[in-house]
Image (cartoon, rainbow, N blue to C red):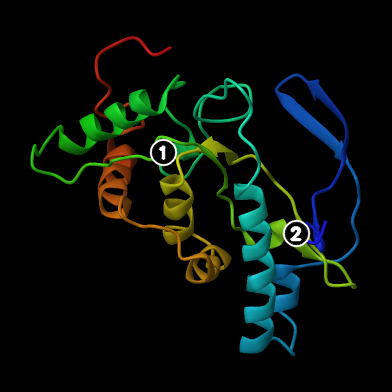
Amino acid sequence: MKQTSGIRIPEVYRTLQSGDWFYIIMEYIPGKTLQQLADQRDWGESRQKALTNSIARAMRLLMSIAVPAGQTPGPVGGGQIRHPLFKDDTSFCNYLTVDELEKHLNDAATLRDKTAPTVSLESSLCFYYSDFYASNFIFTDSGDVCIIDFDQAGFLPPSFMSFALAESHWAPGRWVKEVLKLPEHNLPAMKHIHYFFMIGGSSFGEWGEPCP
């Protein structure tokens, strides 16, 4: 219980779809977003550090979530990966195994230069969260941190969490990176691959076999 104390996720009450629009009806948790707090006059280094530590603790908890049986790389239940490594934050296709994902990434890395760095992904999956926009973190008056917007989340090798933090467009991701200090051995290769995905699309380097 102590591990989860002070960390909240809004309860989802209902989901519905109308045409191309998908709606989530969820619990309202009053508070101020990290962005709103950062805009206040009393914002300073000590407060930034305290709130960053709260977010980092929440990320550790999320990363400890048990992997569902039969889970493939990506969202719960399978599907295209939503992660900033890929162009438009979306993978080209579904991957059934980590080996399949690693092969595509390394094909992309070495398509133009066979000596380019490649990734050696961890064989295990862990929960990742990759949208560190400051308004996705709400702090209640009692100091709890509430996390919203799980569009770019799911189960991937831990190196994907490292990349999401190191290459975050948003400052909170880079702040949390300095607290979590996750392994970064795959970062050089992933940055290289990310560049080619940005200019060539997330199918760049696709190994020539039909995607699952």
Neighbor class of circle 1 (other Cα within 10 Å; few <14, some 14-19, many 20+) is many
The residue at 90%/73% (across/down) is 141
In the rendered image, residue 32, in percent from the top left (x then y), is placed at: 82, 68
Find residue 42 and report its horizontal and vertical position in percent. Answer: 74, 90
Q: Earlier in the sequence, mark 2 or mark 1?
A: 2
Considering only vertical position in the picture, is 189 above or below 113?
below
- Regarding mark 2 in the picture, which secondary structure is present there? loop
Above/below status of 181 relative to 62: below
Q: Position of residue 162 (x, y in %)?
A: 44, 54
Q: Label 2, on which residue?
A: 3
Residue type for callout 2 = Gln
Q: Quadrant of residue 182?
A: bottom left
Q: Is residue 44 in view? A: no
Most foreground residue, 192 or 117: 117
Q: Residue furthest front?
A: 1
Label 1: which secondary element: loop
**Which label lies toward us, 2 or 1?**
2
Q: Which residue is mark 1?
A: 86
Q: Nearer the viewer, residue 142 or 201?
A: 142
> From mark 2 to mark 1, how far is it between C-alphas?
32 Å
Point out residue 18 in the picture as x, y percentages from the top left corner. Answer: 80, 21
